[in-house]
Amino acid sequence: MNLTLHVWRQKGPEDRGRLERYAARNIDPELSFLEMLDQLNGELIREGREPIVFDHDCREGICGACSQVINGEAHGPQAETTVCQLYMRQFQDGDEIYVEPWRARAFPVIKDLVVDRSALDRLIEAGGYISVGTGGVPDANAILVPGEAAETAMDAAECIGCGACVAACPNGSAMLFVAAKIAHLASLPQGRPEASRRVCSMTDAMGREGFGNCSNHYECEAACPKGISVKFIAQLNREYLKTLPKAATSKAP
């Protein structure tokens, strides 16, 4: 396969950036998209040109570090697939492919296709955890969990925190990511004691980090490589509404 790539090149957060055109020749259809970029970078290095900088880690569809927008779609055209698991057989000989980084105010570009996604880490720091005192913690299997709650928690826990939902959302919202974390923990008895504090602190953190609001476009669910459902956003909203009477009471003179 011979392809034409239009790749976003940007030296850093302050650089304007631009799309550059590259010819990717003799591409094996069985290569992954990242392997294709590896091959292209090898050619660029041999020519004395600067290689394209992109992020990756496991290359097994687990970590989500391979965050790229391909032809306008987060992680590319194949549903529920990360870039590292997207194979070139999804494209045709002669195709023109546009490759860009995540586009969101909360994800500044570090270089080329690499963005700073540490805002997601700070959302977790704001409340995406369970506080447990050491020393007297009961075994996890000693706490009975209803089957339906366990299934819901496991479905939400599939989120890998790649940020595709943010990149796909026209508002740059992180609601699906936060909703998955809140639903995961709020569905389990271990997470219920801190549910109110968690939903408030993580929602407030979204605003501080520059994420936009959810306006029900559902692009987040369509782009998610793990198929996280927007039903968890509804659950987040329900958890948040439960806190309103308490918040009003605590602020009353």
Image (cartoon, rainbow, N blue to C red):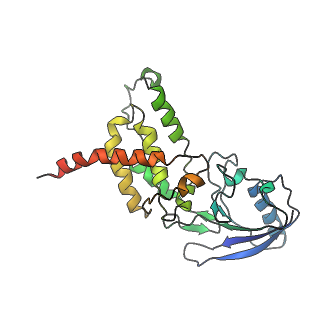
Is 249 or 67 nearer to us in this picture? 249
Residue depicted at x 49% and y 51%: 177
Residue 86 in the figure: left or right of residue 132:
right
Residue 252 in the figure: left or right of residue 222:
left
Residue 187 in the figure: left or right of residue 13:
left
- The residue furthest top is 142
Q: Position of residue 16 (x, y in %)?
A: 59, 79
For residue 97, say whether it is visible: yes
Q: Position of residue 30 (x, y in %)?
A: 83, 52
Is 126 or 171 nearer to us in this picture? 171
Q: Position of residue 148 (x, y in %)?
A: 47, 30
Residue depicted at x 67% and y 50%: 81
Residue depicted at x 55% and y 57%: 219
Residue 73 in the figure: left or right of residue 133:
right
- The residue furthest front is 217
Q: Quadrant of residue 20?
A: bottom right
For residue 198, say whether it is visible: no
Q: Which quadrant: the N terminus?
A: bottom right
Q: Position of residue 149 (x, y in %)?
A: 45, 31
Vertical placement of residue 33 versus 7, above or below: above
Q: Quadrant of residue 91?
A: bottom right
Residue depicted at x 53% and y 38%: 155
